[in-house]
Amino acid sequence: MVSFDLRETLIPFSLLQITNLFREMEPGDEMEIIAGTDPDEAAMIKDVLRILPHTNYDLIARETVIHDGPLTRLRLRKKKNQTPKTRKEPHHV
């Protein structure tokens, strides 16, 4: 499982790293994202859920835990590849 700790990081850069790594993950792989109580970190959790296509992951856990202060922990599992949609060719008469 890949883990991202957003505390004390550059948030925009972290979002790019998370989305790129998620794209490269294999189906069944899990990702954990940890954020503190900073408003930017809390917003980052929402941004991750908004940016990643909902059809590509299962939300395994979203919880608040106490560990040297309150933390939000988000765990995602990449779903199996969806069947690609076939593109219809134009019908010529």
Image (tube, grey):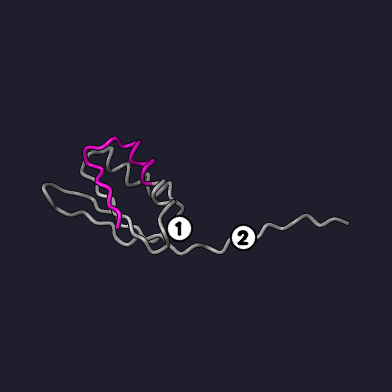
Q: Amino acid at mark 2?
A: Lys
Q: Position of residue 65 (x, y in %)?
A: 17, 54
Residue identifier under label 1: 56
Tell me where residue 63 appears, x and y as whole percent: 24, 56
Q: Amino acid at mark 1?
A: Asn
The image position of residue 11, as x and y in percent, is: 31, 37
Point out the stretch of residues depicted in magenta: 1-18
Residue wearing tag 2 = 85
Expressed as whole percent of the image width and height from the top left, the position of residue 29 reads: 36, 61
Please indicate whether residue 16 sits to the left or right of residue 33 in the image: right
Residue 88's place in the image compared with 17, above or below, is below
Residue 17 is a magenta residue: yes
Front-lying residue, 18 or 70: 18
- Quadrant containing the N terminus is bottom left
Q: State the residue in front, 34 or 26.
A: 26
Residue at 24% x, 46% y: name it: 5
